[in-house]
């Protein structure tokens, strides 16, 4: 069989900007490879919140993992769309730093279902694996204290993710404006049709079965929350993602 020319469907460019230090400040800022985060960001936005009691933010430096944390709800990369939508265009992402979201209620009941992950961080988080921070990465720890009732109401973890995402969005808004030529690494990925070649599909089973087991799809930002759809609300229907959509953070685990 004669093979025809490849057809490019989508082009995705990911530019990474490496962070070497994270510090608390009175505003969000990225300057000279240093990320500053606003230390009192959550003080006003959770006033009279129906589900959340308080939110604490800590910077965990490399090597400072011998500390107690509540159940880990998510490890979130900091990425943003500069051009286009999820799966195509240009994405900026930070390396050297991740956001870790943890949660329990005010009585210490953990945000978990069949098994919780609270404990000493170095014993609960395997560093340097796919989707986890490396040993030399900073961790922005967003610890959410929920009001009572979290185990029976889906809105508790959903609200926690919404609030954490609004915090990350403040960083994304700055990341969008970083000069394009200052990137540390640049990668190009193409979704292609190869006429005459084998058609390959990878099947991934994801959870969508209750308060704690949910996944978010097609948010406005890579690995984001706002604008996304819950797989539960979508009735667990099969979803087709292109390689670049998956690579660009179209799927986010909610717990």
Image (spheres, grey):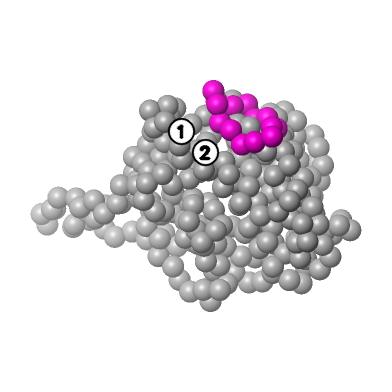
State the mark number for residue 42.
Answer: none
Asked if the stretch drawn in magenta spans residue 30, the answer is: yes
* Residue 102 seen in this snapshot: no
* Residue at mark 1: 178
- 221 sits to left or right of 55: left
On the image, the x and y values in percent for residue 117 come to 76, 51
Please give the range of residues in magenta. Answer: 21-34
> Which quadrant is home to the N terminus?
bottom left
Q: Is residue 144 above or below residue 25?
A: below
Viewer-closest of 192 and 76: 76
Task: Name which quarter of the figure residue 131 lies in.
Answer: top right
Residue 200, percent from left and from top: 33, 59
Give SS at disc 2. Answer: helix
In percent of the image, x 55 and y 67: which residue is there? 230
Magenta stretch holds residue 84:
no
The residue where tag 2 is placed is 174
Q: At 46% from the left edge and 33% from the top edge, which residue is drawn? A: 178
> Residue lying furthest right in this view?
107
């Amino acid at each position: 069989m004669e093979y025809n020319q490849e057809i490019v469907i989508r082009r995705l460019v990911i530019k990474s900007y490496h962070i070497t230090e994270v510090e608390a400040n009175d505003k969000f800022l990225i300057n000279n490879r240093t990320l500053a985060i606003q230390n009192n960001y959550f003080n006003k936005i959770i006033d009279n919140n129906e589900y959340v009691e308080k939110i604490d933010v800590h910077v965990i430096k490399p090597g400072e993992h011998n500390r107690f944390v509540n159940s880990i709800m998510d490890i979130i990369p900091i990425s943003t769309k500069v051009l286009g939508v999820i799966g195509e265009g240009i994405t900026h992402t930070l390396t050297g730093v991740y956001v870790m979201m943890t949660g329990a209620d005010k009585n210490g009941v953990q945000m978990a279902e069949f098994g919780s992950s609270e404990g000493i961080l170095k014993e609960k988080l395997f560093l340097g694996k796919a989707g986890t921070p490396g040993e030399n990465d900073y961790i922005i720890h967003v610890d959410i204290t929920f009001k009572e009732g979290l185990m029976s109401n889906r809105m508790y973890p959903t609200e926690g993710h919404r609030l954490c995402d609004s915090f990350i969005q403040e960083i994304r808004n700055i990341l969008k404006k970083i000069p394009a030529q200052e990137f540390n690494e640049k990668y190009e990925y193409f979704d292609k049709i190869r006429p005459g070649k084998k058609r390959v599909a990878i099947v991934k089973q994801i959870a969508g079965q209750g308060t704690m087991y949910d996944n978010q799809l097609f948010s406005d930002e890579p690995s984001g929350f706002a604008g996304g759809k819950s797989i539960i609300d979508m009735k667990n229907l099969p979803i087709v993602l292109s390689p670049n959509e998956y690579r660009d953070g179209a799927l986010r685990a909610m717990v």
